[in-house]
């Protein structure tokens, strides 16, 4: 039976990611082998340049791009180039850290 009254209280907030730890996730997961990203000092060309493709994108877009890379494929790239299993390989903390590292700085 589902509740019928109003929800009381608040939902827990997701722990914010740590960009420094996210750089280690980026390196350990081998992201730089395929992506150029200035903050990581990488110049891969198999996937899009993240400095360009993530410009103006929010955390939700970045997270989806990691966990469901075919949801929106960057122009000029084919589906299924990026591994489809990062959503299951990275735990929630690693994912939050990686998103924090990749999120464009204002």
Image (cartoon, rainbow, N blue to C red):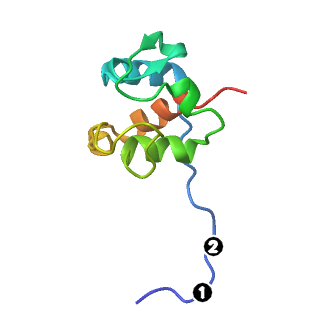
Instruction: Assign the N terminus to one quadrant of the image.
Output: bottom left
Q: Residue at x 51, y 40 (%)?
A: 62
Q: Which residue is mark 2?
A: 8
Q: Quadrant of residue 32?
A: top left
Tell me residue 46's x, y (percent): 34, 25
Q: Is residue 53 visible?
A: yes
> Any mark on residue 5, and which?
1
- Name the element at disc 2: loop
- Give the Cα distance between marks 1 and 2: 9 Å
Tell me residue 7's x, y (percent): 61, 76
- Name the element at disc 1: loop
Q: Nearer the viewer, residue 96 or 84?
A: 84
Q: Nearer the viewer, residue 40 or 35?
A: 35
Instruction: Check whether the beta carbons of the residues at disc 1 and disc 2 lie within 8 A of each other.
Output: yes
Residue at the limit of the structure toward the front, as seen here: 76
Instruction: Assign the C terminus to one quadrant of the image.
Output: top right
Q: Residue at x 67, y 26 (%)?
A: 105
Q: Nearer the viewer, residue 14 or 25?
A: 25
């Amino acid at each position: 039976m589902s509740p019928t009254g109003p929800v009381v209280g608040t939902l827990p907030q997701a722990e914010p990611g740590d960009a420094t730890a996210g750089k280690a996730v980026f390196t350990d997961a081998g992201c730089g082998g395929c992506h150029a990203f200035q903050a990581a000092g990488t110049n891969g060309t198999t996937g899009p340049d993240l400095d360009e493709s993530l410009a103006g994108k929010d955390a939700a877009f970045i997270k989806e791009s990691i966990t469901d890379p075919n949801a929106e494929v960057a122009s000029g790239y084919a589906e299924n180039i990026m591994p489809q299993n990062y959503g299951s390989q990275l735990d929630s903390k690693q994912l939050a850290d990686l998103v924090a590292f990749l999120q464009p700085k204002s």
